[in-house]
Image (spheres, rainbow, N blue to C red):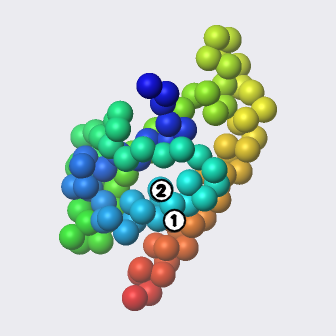
Amino acid sequence: RPRPDFCIGDLQGKTTSPEFRALIVDTLKGMGYSVNVNDPYVGNVLIGRHGNPARGIDSVQIEVNKKLFMDTQTFLATAGLVKLKVDIDQLLGVVAADTRKRIKS
């Protein structure tokens, strides 16, 4: 089965709120990417150690499919790397704006 462009892992909902996860997933999908949640990767010890959505601390693992930015035969960057950088910067901007909004509330 084909791998998605992105996989968002949150230890099956334990390390982030559904709203924050949806913000990330919806933003990436709005950019045209395919996104899975907790499949094939659910996350790891690091996000489990820090994520505590009940206290407003969201932690996710974001896996990026290498095909978006590199030739998997030569391991050299492709033209897709430029777009991916722009899109990840935009995603981080969306996350930062959401964080600022939640802190003010």
Query: Which quadrant would the N terminus be assigned to in this image?
Result: top left
Q: Position of residue 34 (x, y in %)?
A: 54, 44
Q: In which quarter of the image is residue 90?
A: bottom right
**The furthest residue to the top:** 73
Question: 10 Å neighbourhood of mark 2: few (<14), some, or many (≥20)?
Answer: many
Q: Of 24 and 47, which appears nearest the observer? A: 24
Q: Where is residue 59 in the image (x, y as percent from the top left)?
A: 34, 55
Q: Name the residue under label 1.
A: 95
**The furthest residue to the bottom:** 105
Q: Nearer the viewer, mark 2 or mark 1?
A: 2
Q: Is 89 situated left or right of 46 in this image? A: right
Q: Is 27 situated left or right of 103 in this image? A: right
Mark 2 / mark 1, whichever is N-terminal: 2
Q: Is residue 8 above or below residue 14?
A: above
Q: Is 71 situated left or right of 101 in this image? A: right
Q: Name the residue under label 2.
A: 25
Q: Where is residue 94 in the image (x, y as percent from the top left)?
A: 57, 66
Query: Which quadrant would the C terminus be assigned to in this image?
Result: bottom left
Task: Write the residue at 50% across / 36% down.
Answer: 4
Task: Write the residue at 73% across / 35% down.
Answer: 80
Task: Write the residue at 22% across / 55% down.
Answer: 14
Q: In which quarter of the image is residue 103?
A: bottom left
Q: Where is residue 13 in the image (x, y as percent from the top left)?
A: 25, 55
Instruction: Report whether residue 2 is seen.
Output: yes
How many angstroms separate mark 2 from mark 1 (CA)? 11 Å
Q: Give the amino acid type for the residue marked by disc 1 in the picture.
A: Val
Q: Is residue 27 above or below residue 81?
A: below
Q: Give the amino acid type for the residue marked by disc 2 in the picture.
A: Val
Q: Of 66 and 100, which appears nearest the observer? A: 66
**Helix, strand or loop for disc 1:** helix
Q: Of 65 and 90, which appears nearest the observer? A: 65
